[in-house]
């Protein structure tokens, strides 16, 4: 379905589709197998201006709306959901945080090279004791002379190759206030990255633990307000949730397309496989779920673009689409039989990547907790948009 795309959006989608098919699909299994993204792929994505899609035009970006960004992420995820996860952080989350809370000098220093793909950025928030729940975080940003000191430990920091890390920390010991973000260059003394984790899915995203041991932060590296910064930065999470849903949709659609082609060419019990009623029914069920996911995604993205966000629709998108994408990939993989569990076919990575996205950018349970608080009229520390 077109979902009433403009000519420009169709052009952006088709550009991403050609990139995914010609550049990404041939190396997607290699990325999964070697847990590394070829530099040439990043360079090609940068040439196509993917890294600057969401960045405002004054800072070297294209200033595209969220719907267009989701179209790109969906197409890329059809070939490699893990690579879509890599660039989702680069396209949406980090640039959005800087655009929302950054000073003019910070925007020029970070957003311009980011839009060119020359400066990779990472998001560092999750902690052992508090997950993504800010009031329980132990990382501290404390005054020291004319700057600040950063101390703490962050888990699951994706995009370990990044030169700049957006690190969240508390500036007070109690309550939900006193929480903000600082811009940390990986070369700063006291930044201590651990070896990358081996993961079930999203291989190539270079995820790992990072320790911050008395890192000095100059005042020009403080992003936004260290007292109420959590509320401001949350607005960057909102489009990021929707972007992650787009990667899950693309993941499920990618495996669906490959499975339909596989079913059409395979004979089973001396007849075409698709003539087996359970097979055709399963495909129909998956198709229906894909279209429901797509409708929810692009309705939510368009509402965000129109500045008509619902308080929790971004979290509904993230939780339901990511969960449903895993259900769809699990069902589709069964149609491959023994071939589906063999790495040589390159299809089981779709189910593994779909499963990974159920915990990336906040586990589904976190999102359902926020949804339930909205439904019941209860207060919640986090608030969607």
Image (spheres, rainbow, N blue to C red):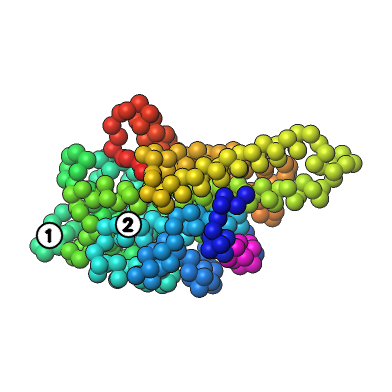
| x then y, percent, for residue 344 | 69, 55
> Where is mark 2, residue-wise?
97
Q: Nearer the viewer, residue 203 or 357?
A: 357
Residue at x 55% of width, y 55% of height: 5
341 relative position to 311: left or right = right
Q: Nearer the viewer, mark 2 or mark 1?
A: 2
Instruction: Give the main secondary structure, helix, strand or loop, of the magenta stretch.
Output: helix
Task: Name the spot of residue 2 as percent of width and height, x first.
Answer: 60, 52
Q: Which residues are magenta?
A: 14-25
Q: Residue at x 49, y 58 (%)?
A: 68
Judge from the rendering whether residue 324 lies leftward or rightward of residue 52; answer left or right: right
Which disc is residue 144 wearing?
A: 1
Q: Position of residue 369 (x, y in %)?
A: 38, 33
Q: Is residue 381 visible?
A: yes
User: Is residue 20 rendered magenta in the image?
Assistant: yes
Q: Residues within 10 Å of mark 2 (few under 14, many from 20)?
A: many
């Amino acid at each position: 379905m077109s979902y009433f795309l403009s000519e420009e959006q169709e052009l952006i989608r088709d550009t991403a589709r050609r990139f995914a098919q010609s550049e990404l699909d041939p190396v997607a299994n290699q990325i999964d197998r070697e847990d590394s993204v070829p530099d040439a792929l990043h360079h090609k994505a940068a040439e196509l201006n993917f890294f600057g899609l969401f960045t405002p035009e004054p800072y070297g970006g294209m200033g595209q709306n969220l719907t267009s960004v989701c179209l790109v992420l969906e197409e890329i995820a059809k070939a490699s959901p893990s690579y879509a996860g890599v660039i989702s952080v680069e396209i949406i989350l980090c640039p959005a945080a800087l655009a929302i809370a950054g000073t003019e000098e910070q925007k020029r220093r970070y957003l311009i090279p980011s839009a060119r793909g020359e400066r990779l950025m990472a998001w560092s928030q999750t902690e052992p004791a508090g997950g993504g729940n800010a009031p329980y975080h132990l990382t501290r940003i404390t005054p020291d002379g004319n700057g600040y000191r950063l101390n703490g430990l962050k888990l699951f920091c994706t995009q370990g190759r990044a030169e700049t890390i957006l690190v969240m920390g508390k500036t007070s010991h109690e309550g939900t206030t006193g929480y903000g973000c600082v811009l940390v260059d990986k070369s700063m003394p006291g930044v201590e990255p651990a070896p990358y984790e081996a993961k079930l899915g999203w291989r190539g995203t270079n995820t790992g633990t990072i320790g911050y041991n008395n890192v000095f932060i100059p005042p020009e590296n403080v992003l936004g307000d260290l007292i109420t910064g959590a509320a401001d930065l949350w607005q960057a999470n909102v489009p990021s949730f929707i972007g992650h849903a787009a990667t899950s949709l693309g993941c499920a659609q990618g495996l669906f397309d490959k499975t339909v082609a596989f079913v059409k060419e395979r004979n089973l019990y001396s007849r075409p496989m698709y003539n087996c009623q359970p097979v055709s029914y399963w495909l129909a069920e998956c198709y229906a779920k894909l279209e429901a996911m797509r409708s929810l995604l692009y309705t939510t993205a368009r509402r965000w673009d129109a500045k008509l966000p619902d308080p929790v629709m971004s979290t509904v998108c993230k939780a339901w689409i990511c969960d449903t994408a895993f259900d769809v990939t699990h069902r589709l993989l069964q149609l491959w039989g023994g071939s589906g569990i063999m790495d040589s076919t390159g299809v089981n990575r779709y189910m593994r990547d779909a499963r990974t996205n159920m915990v990336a950018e906040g586990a589904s349970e976190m999102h359902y907790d926020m949804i339930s608080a909205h439904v019941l009229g209860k207060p919640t520390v986090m608030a969607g948009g």
